[in-house]
Image: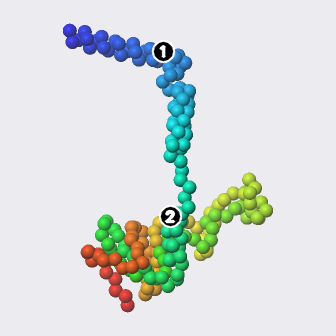
Amino acid sequence: MNKIISIGLLLVAILFLAAVVITPRSANAGWFSSSSKSNEITAAAAVQKDLVKSVPVPQLSNSLERQNVSKRAQLFDTPDKISYIYLVSYGKVMAFFTVKGKVSSLRSYLTPTDKLVYGNGSECDQTWVDSPDCYAINAPDIDGTYGENVEGIFFFTTENAYVEWKGEYMMSDQPLKLQTPPELVRTIK
């Protein structure tokens, strides 16, 4: 009896799959059609429109985000600013330094990284910068080399030592109290 039921279910499944495969695309249009997607998009847009009406975007008179960014820029616009950096690896503070100035990205450059040239390699002049005949290519760095610096940061310590770091770090303009001592210790001579 179980074999008969199993064979019957198998035959029903085969007939169903055959009907789906043999049925013309227009008959299946309701499942995957672009019109059903369009209807869903239209419905979602209507809901969004109602939500915007019921919860409008507020008109801000003050932006704490802009104030914070401005304050940070002013704070580090002092060449003799002293900060404290904690270099972290695998969840441990590896080293601690006092920084003079600011922490900078290794991917900051003094010159553009691209230049515009014609197909023959000659540089595009300013009047033809928007020309479709101008192509962007890599420009040499100030030392005449090409390429991209690794990710990371660099800074100068209060003793004028140059330090690079590729990893996580914490920085503060006041020293932080550490619960565990740094893993790496430096000696300045």
Tag of residue 174: none
Using a 10 Å C-alpha cutoff, classify the residue at mark 1 as few (fewer than 14 neighbours), some (14 to 19) or many (20 or more). few
Q: Residue at x 54, y 78 (%)?
A: 77
Looking at the rendered structure, the kind of residue marked 1 is Ile
Q: Residue at x 39, y 70 (%)?
A: 169
Q: Position of residue 50 (x, y in %)?
A: 53, 39
Left or right, 81 with respect to 115, comes to left
Q: Which residue lies under the disc numbered 1? A: 22
Q: Earlier in the sequence, mark 2 or mark 1?
A: 1
Q: Position of residue 157 (x, y in %)?
A: 43, 83
Q: Which residue lies under the disc numbered 2? A: 65
| Residue 118 drawn above or below residue 72 | above
Q: Quadrant of the rendered structure where residue 121 is?
A: bottom right
Left or right, 45 with respect to 126, comes to left
Secondary structure at badge 2 equals: helix
Q: Position of residue 139 (x, y in %)?
A: 63, 66
Q: Position of residue 154 (x, y in %)?
A: 46, 75
Q: Are marks 2 and 1 in contact (CB under 8 Å)?
A: no
Farthest residue in the bottom direction?
189
For this rendering, which residue is in front, 148 or 21?
21
Q: Residue at x 53, y 53 (%)?
A: 58
For this rendering, which residue is in front, 110 or 133?
110
